[in-house]
Amino acid sequence: MIDISDGMLGDFTRISEESRVGGIIRLEEIPVVPGTAPGEALVSGEEFELLFTIPASQAGAARRSGCFVVGEVLPAGRGVRVTANGRPYRPRHPGYDHFRK
């Protein structure tokens, strides 16, 4: 589990790298405030929400409890990728980097 204050994509990438797995984020599954572009929600920071992984068998229970399922974990070697309505999506940047000027 990680807070996504540095951007969902960057923080999901951190989880994936530390866990030695790949993953996919489905842009259309990210909940956004009306007027916010889903792509912006993917890489902006300061949302102060939590991102966590669960077994796929628990996705239904997570949804019923009010959580949003925005992607899935993939086997190692698949990398992290983003799709928008089933098509590859290239974000404008990977998220906040504390060491970038």
Image (spheres, grey):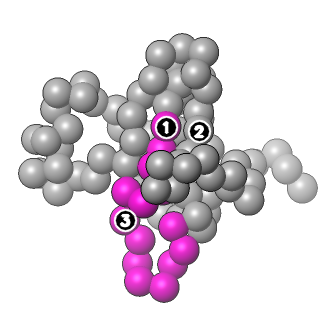
Residue at image position (47%, 49%) is: 86
**What SS does tag 2 mark?**
strand
Q: Could you tell me which secondary element the residue under label 1 belongs to?
A: strand
Q: Residues within 10 Å of mark 3 (few under 14, many from 20)?
A: few
Q: Residue at x 40, y 78 (%)?
A: 33
**Which label was assigned to residue 81?**
2
Q: Label 2: how many residues lie within 10 Å, few (<14), some (14-19) or many (20+)?
A: some
Query: Which amino acid type is marked by label 2?
Result: Arg
To which residue does mark 3 refer?
31
Q: Which residue is mark 1?
A: 24
State which mark lies toward you, 1 or 3: 1
Disc 3 versus disc 2: nearer the observer: 2
Does 14 sit left or right of 33 as displayed? right
Q: Which residues are magenta?
A: 24-38
Q: Residue at x 59, y 38 (%)?
A: 81
Residue 10: which quarter of the image?
top right
Give the quadrant of the C terminus: bottom right
Q: Residues within 10 Å of mark 1 (few under 14, many from 20)?
A: some
Residue 35 within the magenta-colored segment of the rendering: yes
Residue 65: % across, % down: 11, 51
Location of residue 20 with respect to 85 vertically, above or below: above
Amino acid type, label 3: Pro
Q: Nearer the viewer, residue 26 or 5?
A: 26
Is 61 on the left-hand or right-hand side of 23? left
